[in-house]
Amino acid sequence: MAKDPAFLFYTGDFSTGTQFFSNEQVGIYLRLLMAQHQHGRLTEKQVIIISKTLDNEVMRKFTIDTEGLYYNERLESEVEKRKAFSDSRRNNKLGKTKEVKNKSKSYVNHMEDENKNKDIIKKEKKERDEFLISQFEIFWNLYPKKVEKKKAQAIFLSLTIEEIKKIIQTVPNFARFKPFPTYSHPNPTTYLNGKRWEDELKQENNTHQPIITTHEFNEE
């Protein structure tokens, strides 16, 4: 991490603390504070290089640690407080950034899942439509009377899978049934709307022929 280029400088406190310093002493004091801020606690040799001599009044502003190093307690305290504040702000920023990234990632994942679900739904619908159309073509090929194909297909595609299975099961027998030479099967739309496969299923269950209503004999 880069060295903090600054520290809080309280002009009121500094002015009060150096009120009876000479200009030279103020200069020496400032240079020692700046040296400590940039390099840490100072050796006696470093202090002498800056101050030329250990000025008693100036040196009262400094404490000597167990290793013989000089430091200003107030400066060290302010540096630590500033560092703690900067770390706190940085962590908050990183936390928010991480939170935003997590939300963004969550949103992207959600959208990807949603798009996948849409693709699956589209695929399933396409497969179902293709299946229903193929079943209608089977019905159309088996059914003996071929009129109004588009209308018949629209009705057929609106039916349930179970109904379509029943139609495919029973339509061959229904198509073969012709009791009289003049008998005409109902139109496909009539067959589908009237659910005539149900009649056929009933007849199969009762082992009888399909029920033929009078109006079917002459239906065009």
Image: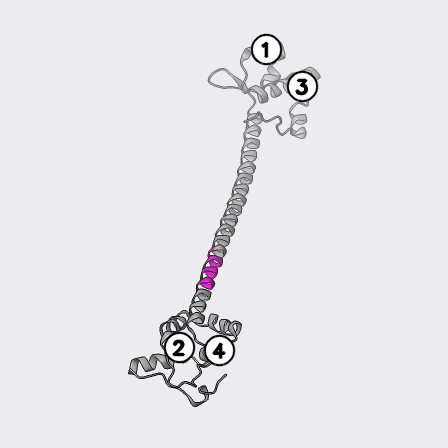
Percent from the top left, x then y, of residue 43? Answer: 53, 14
> Which residue is found at the position 45% from the left and 71% from the top?
140
CA distance for labels 2 and 4: 14 Å
Q: Give the quarter of the figure containing the N terminus.
A: top right
Of 125 and 200, nearer the camera is 200
Instruction: Give the secondary structure at mark 1.
Output: helix
Tell me if 58 is positioned left or right of 201 in this view: right
Percent from the top left, x then y, of residue 38? Answer: 58, 21
Residue type highlighted by circle 1: Ile
Percent from the top left, x then y, of residue 131? Answer: 43, 63
CA distance for labels 1 and 4: 111 Å
Residue 151 included in the magenta stretch of the image: no
Percent from the top left, x then y, of residue 63? Answer: 53, 20
Pointer 4: what residue? 189
Identify the magenta region. 120-131
Which label sits in the foreground, 1 or 4? 4
Q: Are marks 2 and 4 in contact (CB under 8 Å)?
A: no
> Which residue is found at the position 62% from the left and 26% from the top?
5
Residue 121 included in the magenta stretch of the image: yes
Pointer 3: what residue? 26
**Is 7 situated above or below 170?**
above
Q: Which of marks 3 and 1 is nearer the N terminus?
A: 3
CA distance for labels 2 and 3: 116 Å
Direction right: furthest residue: 23
Q: Earlier in the sequence, mark 2 or mark 4?
A: 2
Residue type highlighted by circle 2: Ala
Pointer 1: what residue? 48
- Magenta span: predominant SS is helix
* Label total for image: 4
Q: Residues within 10 Å of mark 1 (few under 14, many from 20)?
A: some
Pointer 2: what residue? 175
Of 175 and 159, nearer the camera is 175
